[in-house]
Image (cartoon, rainbow, N blue to C red):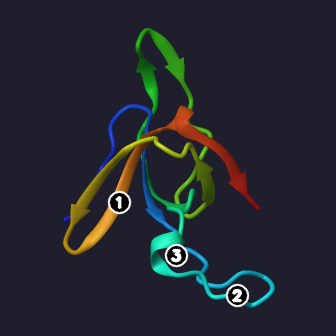
Amino acid sequence: MKLVPLGDRVVLKQVAAETTTKSGIVIPGSEKEKPQQAQIIAVGPGGVVDGKEVTMQVKVGQTVIYSKYAGTEVKLEDETYIIVKQSDILAIVE
């Protein structure tokens, strides 16, 4: 099965969270924050959304940082994805 986003939607897969700090301290599972970095799996076509022309500025394979509480989590074939609007993506990690 394949997710195909519509309009200005983007499908993301979260990057695994760090389990140790730079100084080597192990972070327990309950203290870990949900990572805000993700890899783009699929990108919608853009077009006219809410009366405005939207051009997609992201591509499949890029790593991005997105808003903390943005999107909708979807579980598909034992994988968890997040579907967000392009406007919820804050930056591209290069």
Give the image location of residue 23, x and y in percent: 80, 86
Q: Quadrant of residue 26?
A: bottom right
How many C-alpha atoms fall within 10 Å of the one at disc 2: few (<14), some, or many (≥20)?
few
Residue hosting label 1: 81
How many C-alpha atoms fall within 10 Å of the one at disc 1: few (<14), some, or many (≥20)?
many
Q: Quadrant of the N terminus?
A: bottom left
Front residue (pair 37, 69) = 69
Q: Quadrant of residue 80?
A: bottom left
Residue at image coords 56%, 64%: 61
- Mark 1–mark 2 Cα distance, whole angstroms, equals 29 Å
Is disc 1 placed on a helix, strand or loop? strand
Image height of 48 relative to 72, above or below: above
Is disc 3 placed on a helix, strand or loop? loop
In this image, 49 relative to 92: left or right? left
Residue at image coords 46%, 78%: 29
Residue at image coords 48%, 65%: 14
- Amino acid type for the residue under numbered disc 2: Ile
- Amino acid type for the residue under numbered disc 1: Tyr
Q: Earlier in the sequence, mark 2 or mark 3?
A: 3
Give the image location of residue 28, x and y in percent: 52, 81
Q: Which mark is residue 16?
A: 3
Q: Residue furthest top?
A: 51
Q: Quadrant of the C terminus?
A: bottom right
Residue hosting label 2: 25
Give the image location of residue 55, x and y in percent: 56, 29
Front residue (pair 28, 18) = 28
Can you tell which of label 3 and label 1 is closer to the viewer?
3
Front residue (pair 69, 43) = 69
Image height of 47 relative to 57, above or below: above
Whether the residues at callouts 1 and 2 have beta carbons within 8 Å, the answer is no
Can you tell which of label 1 and label 2 is closer to the viewer?
2
